[in-house]
Image (spheres, rainbow, N blue to C red):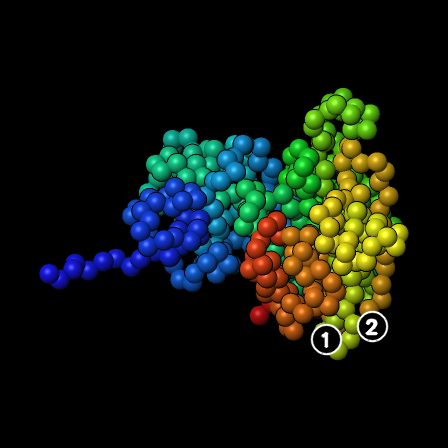
């Protein structure tokens, strides 16, 4: 007896990219009914699905940063992803930030979930967006489908920015239930009439409370300080130092009223919000970096026959062991304590002492500013240079996407955030091809 034609067998879940067995009727990760989900649109695997922008995808005018989302989410929520089969087709673009009172680039989002665009969707409560999993239900104000119950991707799960002087990408990664990284990038005039390009990246400390809010507060405060100080003629190094101090104050202000540093209360179970920070400012032929923690900045010249460099030194257990001569770098970073940080921003920090450094690169290249979600997969300067595409300076956004893909292909165990600054800064109007 001849068999009836069978529909194509899914190899990955269209909702969360979980690999499937031929006999699966439901996804073992997110529980999606595979018979009710459409097949993936082109490409396979999480990297291919999530890095392909769809028509009409919004890219921020200045920097992309979602408002903190305090709504509890289950750790194993499905991950449709912003560039894969789970993309909600009815999602509205972020309003022009120049037409609002909010800081430029901050998506319109309320604490209850993604905000509805004026006049979109039904009159009933909700976001007015269609579910990216079942394609039929509407998304409620808490970010879940009213039909199938799937959680939808949040604005901060994947963010991108591109301009003539900088490109940045941030992604939740493959293992974490939310993105606790943040970035802020911008361009401003200097007091002498020149242009300053700014990138600030922050990694929330997962063992602390509300790390996503901490990183968001840090990059906003640092960026605003740099944008205010540089046009007044403040030197980039002094402005960077002040920006990190202001970021520390902003993160410290997130602690609960009456909070005392943990060393004064050994029995307290809760850490205050905390994060790391790293920044880069390109002004003419000068490159200035600042940091606290273990987020890093790298210099990668166009001419790969010349030496790349790591521009920052970690505030971490491993770095202390190496500096003290107690372990080699390979031994220290292989230890399970390697990533225990010894410097951070937050009310529980022992002392805030920003590190700053300035450089005068003598050849063209790019500055890579990133969290450990990237450099864990390209730790040394030579390893980072090996994965930076040769056309990175002319295509910084493609470079940032490529570096994200490298981290995701390596396992994506952490949130991944990277900013790429061409050096020298391209003339106005230049950008990625």
User: Which mark's residue is nearer the viewer, 2 or 1?
Assistant: 1
Decide which of 203, 422 is in the foreground and name it: 203
Q: Is residue 128 above or below residue 257?
A: below
Q: In the shown orientation, is residue 37 left or right of residue 155? A: left
Residue at figure coordinates x 68%, y 61% from the top left? 378
Of residues 143 and 103, the one drawn nearer to the viewer in this rendering: 143
Question: What residue is at 54 percent from the left and 45 percent from the top?
Answer: 155
In contact (CB < 8 Å): disc 2 and disc 1: no
List the residue tagged with mark 1: 304
Could you tell me which secondary element the residue under label 2 belongs to?
A: loop
Residue 120 quadrant: top left
Where's the C terminus, which quadrant? bottom right
The image shows residue 365 at horizontal and vertical percentages of 73, 70
Q: Viewed as shown, does residue 398 lie left or right of 313?
A: left
Measured Cα–Cα span from mark 2 to mark 1: 14 Å
Q: Nearer the viewer, residue 22 or 361?
A: 22
Q: Is residue 281 above or below residue 80?
A: below
Q: Position of residue 175 (x, y in %)?
A: 55, 47
Residue at (65%, 59%) from the top-left corner?
A: 377
Residue identifier under label 2: 362
């Amino acid at each position: 007896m001849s068999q009836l034609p069978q529909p194509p067998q899914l190899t990955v879940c269209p909702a969360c990219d979980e690999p499937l067995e031929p006999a699966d009727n439901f996804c073992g990760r997110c529980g999606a009914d595979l018979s009710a989900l459409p097949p993936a649109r082109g490409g396979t695997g999480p990297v291919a699905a999530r890095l392909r922008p769809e028509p009409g995808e919004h890219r921020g005018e200045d920097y992309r940063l979602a408002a903190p989302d305090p709504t509890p989410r289950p750790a194993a929520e499905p991950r449709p992803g912003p560039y894969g089969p789970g993309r909600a087709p009815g999602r509205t673009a972020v309003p022009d930030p120049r037409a609002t009172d909010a800081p430029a680039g901050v998506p319109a989002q309320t604490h209850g979930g993604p905000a509805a665009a004026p006049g979109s969707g039904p009159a009933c409560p909700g976001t007015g967006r269609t579910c990216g999993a079942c394609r039929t239900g509407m998304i409620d104000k808490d970010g879940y489908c009213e039909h199938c119950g799937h959680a939808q991707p949040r604005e901060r799960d994947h963010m991108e920015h591109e301009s003539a002087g900088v490109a940045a990408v941030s992604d939740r990664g493959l293992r974490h239930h939310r993105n606790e990284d943040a970035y802020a990038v911008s361009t401003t005039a200097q007091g002498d009439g020149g242009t300053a390009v700014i990138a600030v990246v922050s990694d929330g400390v997962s063992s602390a409370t509300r790390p996503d809010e901490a990183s968001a507060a840090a990059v906003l405060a640092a960026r605003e300080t740099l944008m205010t100080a540089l046009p007044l003629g403040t030197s980039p190094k002094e402005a960077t130092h002040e920006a990190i101090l202001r970021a520390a104050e902003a993160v410290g202000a997130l602690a609960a009223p009456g909070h005392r540093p943990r060393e004064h209360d050994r029995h307290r179970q809760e850490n205050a919000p905390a994060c790391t920070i790293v920044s880069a400012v390109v002004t003419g032929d000068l490159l200035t970096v600042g940091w606290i923690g273990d987020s890093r900045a790298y210099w990668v010249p166009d001419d790969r026959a010349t030496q790349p460099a790591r521009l920052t030194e970690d505030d971490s257990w491993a770095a202390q062991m190496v500096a003290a001569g107690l372990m080699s770098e390979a031994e220290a970073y292989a230890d399970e304590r390697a990533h225990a940080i010894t410097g951070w921003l937050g009310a529980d920090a022992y002392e805030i002492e920003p590190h700053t450094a300035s450089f005068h690169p003598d050849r063209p290249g790019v500055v890579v500013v990133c969290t450990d979600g990237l450099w864990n997969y390209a730790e040394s300067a030579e390893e980072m240079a090996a994965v930076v595409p040769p056309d990175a300076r002319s295509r910084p956004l493609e470079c940032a996407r490529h570096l994200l893909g490298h981290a995701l292909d390596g396992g994506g165990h952490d949130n991944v955030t990277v900013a790429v600054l061409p050096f020298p800064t391209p003339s106005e109007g230049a950008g990625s091809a």
